[in-house]
Each structure stands twice: as C-alpha cells, then as structure tokens.
C-alpha cells in the first residue's frame, strides 16, 4: 500500500517527516498519520463496501426463503383460475411453474454476480490490500447489482399477467412474461498487433474512468506457465459457461478451436 521515499511534507500534519506514500490517493504521510490514514481506509471499506454488500446479500437470502414479492401475481393466477373453473387449471399450473422458474433464474444470475464481489471483498479484507480506488470500484459494482435486484423486485403486475377474454387461445390463457432487460450499450475495445500492451497501459493510465483491463474466461485447458486469473479464468465445466453465456453474464463470447472464450 505504501512505499519508502525521500522526506516529503506530511499531507496531514505538514511536517517534513513524510516517508510513506499511499498509492491510492498519492499523498505522503508521516508514520503516525499514515497509520491513521490506514485506519480511516478500513472504516470506509467497512461502511461503504462491506455494509452495502451485506445488506444486498441479506435481501437476496430473504428472496431465497420467500416468494413474498410475487404473491400479487400468484393471487391473480389463483383468482382467475377459480373464475374459469376446469378449463384454466392446466394453464394456471403452467403459469405457476414458469413464475417459479423465472424467480429462480433471476436469483441465480444476481447471486453469481454477487459471489464474485464476495470473494474479492474477502481477499481485500484478509490481505488488508485496498485503497480508495478499490472502495469506489467495489461500491459501483454493488450498486449495479443492487439496481438490477431492485428492478426485478418491483411489484409491477400490470405487464406480467396477460388474459384475453375475446377469442380465447387456450394455450395462451395466462402466462408469465419475463421483465425486459436494461441493455448496457458499452462495448469492449479489443487491441491487436505490435505495442498492444503499451497502448493498453497508456489508455488505462490516461483514462482510468473509461478504460480497464479485463481477464477473459475460457474452457480450454491451462497451459504450462499460465496462472489462473492472470492470462485467463479457466472454466472446467463447459455446460456452466454455456449457461452463463445464455444468462448474459458475458459482454462478448465465442468459440475457437473447440473451446469457448468470453469476456465478463
């Protein structure tokens, strides 16, 4: 987190005794104030990252134990089923099953995305290796997942249950329509050719708010001298990666040489 350097003015006490540099905020501190700076970072990490993460995780765990947010939909299904008697029973059972599948599908997607952040938070806390940029980045990721969860958790039943009273199609009497996704139109920038590493590093250094490096996933076997999480995230289960692609967990994906590749 910090490096030894020539004496500088401490950004806290302004004394020419600063020997520690915070690589996050780029400020110099004396040994005493640097410890306080680390303590404040730890407090901010707990307040802004760990607390937000735990609150979101608690909401998702409650969702796993209860279908309370969808009771209005089930009530509509049951009421409509009673009024249409025998002809609607099969359709109502089908719709009930589709709704349960939809809830499970959405919960699985959000849980997988949060699991990655859970692991990263655990590593940061165990290694005590985080700076302001890490807090901002993790906070942004948690907020993105939180927005997706809140969007799916909205009790808007007006567009979910479709009943036609005129020229009834008995195969479409009642059904569950999956909520539309908000598409993120940001696109990956892929750099090929000579000096690609130099260009990549320069873009990230000059525009850290726009560009970031990513590590792709692949189902191909790991080669000698390759390290998990450095060159690739190696996926042993091809079916799992196929499912993740279908669930839009990758911004781009494809197949080459019989192996799947994807960028998340």
Image (tube, helix red, strand yellow):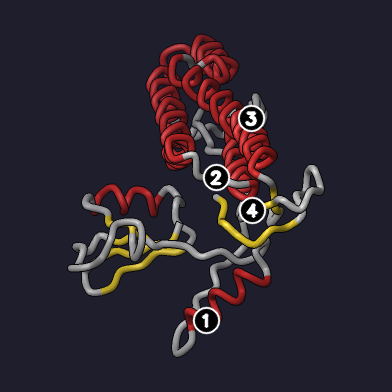
Q: 129 or 153: nearer the eye?
A: 129
Give the vertical position of 253 relative to 166 (above or below): below
**C-alpha span from label 2 to label 4:** 19 Å
In the figure, residue 8 lies in which quadrant? bottom right
Q: Secondary structure at mark 3?
A: helix
> Is residue 203 found left or right of 85 in the rendered image?
right
Q: What is the x, y in percent for residue 230?
A: 36, 61
Disc number placed over residue 141 in the picture, else none: none
Residue 164 appears in the rendering: no
- How far apart in space, not on screen, are marks 2 and 3 (Cα)? 12 Å
Numbered mark located on residue 43 in the image: 3
Q: How many marks?
A: 4
Residue at the spot 44% in from the left edge and 15% down from the top edge: 65
Looking at the image, is mark 2 or mark 4 earlier in the sequence?
A: 4
- Residue under label 2: 130
Say whether disc 3 or disc 4 marks the residue closer to the N-terminus.
Answer: 4
Q: Tell me what residue is drawn at x 22 percent, y 64 percent.
A: 220
Q: 27 above or below 12?
A: below
Mark nearest the camera among 2 and 4 is: 4
Q: Position of residue 183 (x, y in %)?
A: 61, 54
Contact between labelled residues 3 and 2, with CB atoms less than 8 Å apart: no
* Measured Cα–Cα span from mark 2 to mark 1: 25 Å
Query: What secondary structure is found at the residue carrying circle 2?
Result: loop
């Amino acid at each position: 987190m910090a490096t030894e350097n020539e004496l500088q003015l401490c950004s806290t006490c302004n004394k020419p005794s600063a020997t520690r540099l915070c690589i996050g905020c780029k400020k110099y501190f004396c040994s005493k104030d640097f410890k306080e700076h680390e303590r404040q970072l730890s407090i901010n990490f707990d307040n802004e990252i760990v607390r937000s993460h735990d609150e979101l995780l608690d909401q998702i765990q409650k969702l796993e134990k209860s279908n309370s947010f969808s009771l209005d939909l089930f009530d509509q299904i049951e009421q409509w089923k009673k009024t249409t008697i025998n002809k609607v029973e099969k359709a109502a059972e089908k719709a009930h099953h589709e709704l349960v599948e939809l809830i499970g599908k959405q919960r699985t997607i959000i849980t997988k995305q949060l699991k990655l952040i859970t692991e990263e938070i655990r590593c940061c806390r165990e290694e005590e290796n985080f700076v302001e940029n890490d807090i901002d980045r993790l906070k942004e990721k948690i907020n993105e997942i939180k927005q997706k969860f809140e969007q799916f958790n909205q009790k808007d039943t007006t567009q979910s249950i479709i009943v036609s009273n005129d020229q009834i199609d008995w195969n479409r009497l009642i059904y569950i329509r999956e909520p539309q996704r908000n598409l993120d139109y940001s696109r990956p920038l892929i750099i090929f050719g000579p000096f690609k590493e130099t260009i990549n590093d320069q873009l990230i250094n000059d525009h850290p708010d726009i560009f970031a490096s990513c590590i792709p996933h692949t189902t191909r076997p790991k080669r000698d001298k390759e390290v998990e999480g450095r060159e690739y995230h190696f996926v042993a289960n091809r079916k799992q990666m196929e499912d993740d692609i279908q669930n839009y967990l990758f911004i781009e994906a494809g197949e080459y040489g019989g192996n799947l590749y994807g960028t998340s």
